[in-house]
C-alpha cells in the first residue's frame, strides 16, 4: 500500500528532473549561441583594427621615405652651398611664364639659361650649379615642394641636353613655398614667388 501511494510522487519527481534538464540544455545552447555571436563580432573588430594598423604603417612608411628624400636633397644642397657663390640668376614667373601647376620652360626662360651658360662656357670656370625651385602658397605644401622640384629639374635637364656639363656639377633643390620674396596675399607677390634661381658656385 505504501509503494502504490509513493508512486505518483516518484513519477512527478522524475518528470520535474526531465523538464528541468531540458530547460537547462536549452539555456546552455542559447548562451553558447550568444557567445558565438560575440566571438564573431570580436573577430571582425580585430580584423578591422589589423587592417587599419596595416594602412597606417604603410602611410607612415611613405611619409618617412618622402621625408628622407627631402633630407637628402637638403643635405646635398647644403654641402654644395659651402662653396663660394659667384653670382645667381633668377628666372621669375613673368620670364618663365610657368603655367599653373606646370613645369615646362618657355622660350623666354630658355633664353635666360642660354645667356648664363654661354657666359660660363666662355669663362671656362670650374663652377657648379645649384638650381632652386620656389612656389607661391597656392596648393598644399607637399604639392608646392614637388612642383618646385619639377621646375628646377626642368632647368637642369635643359642644361644637360644643350651644354656639356657633368651631371655631378648640377644639383637641384625645392624650397616649395618656404622662402617667399613677396606677399603671397597679392597676385603680383605670388608671381614673384614662383621662380627658379640658378646659383653659380665656385
Image: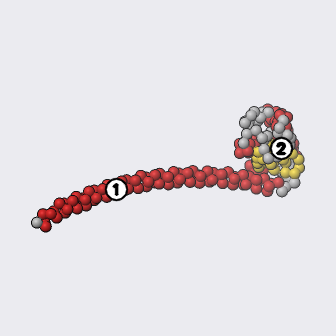
- Foreground tag (2 vs 1): 1
In the displayed structure, does residue 30 sit left or right of residue 91? Answer: left
Residue 183's spot in the image, x, y percent?
85, 40
Asked if the residues shown at circle 2 and circle 1 are in contact, with their CB atoms under 8 angstroms apart, the answer is no
Q: CA distance from mark 2 to mark 1?
A: 74 Å
For marks 2 and 1, the one nearer the N-term is: 1
Out of 77 and 45, give the one closest to the viewer: 45
Instruction: In the displayed orientation, state which residue is furthest to the left.
Output: 1
Question: Tell me, what colour scheme is on the image?
Answer: secondary structure
From this viewpoint, is residue 171 visible? Answer: yes
Q: Describe the element under mark 2 as helix, strand or loop.
A: loop
Image-quadrant location for residue 17: bottom left
Residue drawn at x 72%, y 54% is: 72
Q: Quadrant of the N terminus?
A: bottom left
Number of other residues with Cα within 10 Å of mark 1, as a class: few under 14, some 14 to 19, many 20 or more: few
Q: Is residue 14 visible?
A: no
Using the rendered view, name the quadrant where residue 145 is placed: top right
Q: Which residue is mark 1?
A: 27
- How many marks on residues? 2
Question: Residue at horizontal 76%, vertical 45%?
Answer: 176
Instruction: Count residues near mark 2 (Cα–Cα under 10 Å), then give few for <14, some for 14-19, many for 20+.
Output: some
Task: Please tell me which residue lies in front, 104 or 24.
Answer: 24
For image coordinates 79% across by 40% down, the residue present is: 136
Q: Please provide percent x and percent y for residue 46.
A: 50, 54
Return the mark for residue 64: none
Taking the spot 75% from the left edge, 33% from the top edge, the residue there is: 99
Residue underneath mark 2:
180
Residue 195: percent from left, percent from top: 81, 40
- Residue 149: x and y in percent read 74, 44
Amino acid at each position: 500500500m505504501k509503494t502504490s501511494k509513493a508512486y505518483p510522487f516518484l513519477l512527478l519527481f522524475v518528470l520535474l528532473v526531465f523538464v528541468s534538464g531540458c530547460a537547462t540544455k536549452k539555456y546552455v545552447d542559447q548562451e553558447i549561441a550568444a557567445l558565438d555571436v560575440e566571438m564573431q563580432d570580436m573577430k571582425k573588430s580585430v580584423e578591422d583594427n589589423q587592417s587599419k594598423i596595416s594602412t597606417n604603417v604603410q602611410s607612415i612608411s611613405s611619409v618617412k621615405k618622402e621625408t628622407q628624400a627631402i633630407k637628402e636633397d637638403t643635405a646635398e644642397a647644403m654641402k654644395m652651398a659651402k662653396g663660394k657663390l659667384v653670382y645667381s640668376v633668377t628666372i621669375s614667373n613673368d620670364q618663365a611664364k610657368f603655367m599653373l601647376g606646370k613645369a615646362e620652360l618657355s622660350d623666354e626662360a630658355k633664353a635666360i639659361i642660354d645667356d648664363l651658360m654661354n657666359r660660363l662656357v666662355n669663362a671656362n670656370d670650374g663652377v657648379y650649379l645649384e638650381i632652386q625651385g620656389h612656389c607661391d602658397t597656392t596648393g598644399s605644401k607637399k604639392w608646392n615642394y614637388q612642383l618646385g622640384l619639377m621646375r628646377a629639374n626642368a632647368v637642369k635637364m635643359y642644361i644637360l641636353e644643350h651644354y656639356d656639363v657633368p651631371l655631378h656639377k648640377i644639383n637641384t633643390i625645392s624650397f616649395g613655398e618656404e622662402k617667399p620674396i613677396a606677399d603671397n596675399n597679392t597676385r603680383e607677390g605670388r608671381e614673384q614667388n614662383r621662380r627658379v634661381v640658378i646659383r653659380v658656385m665656385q
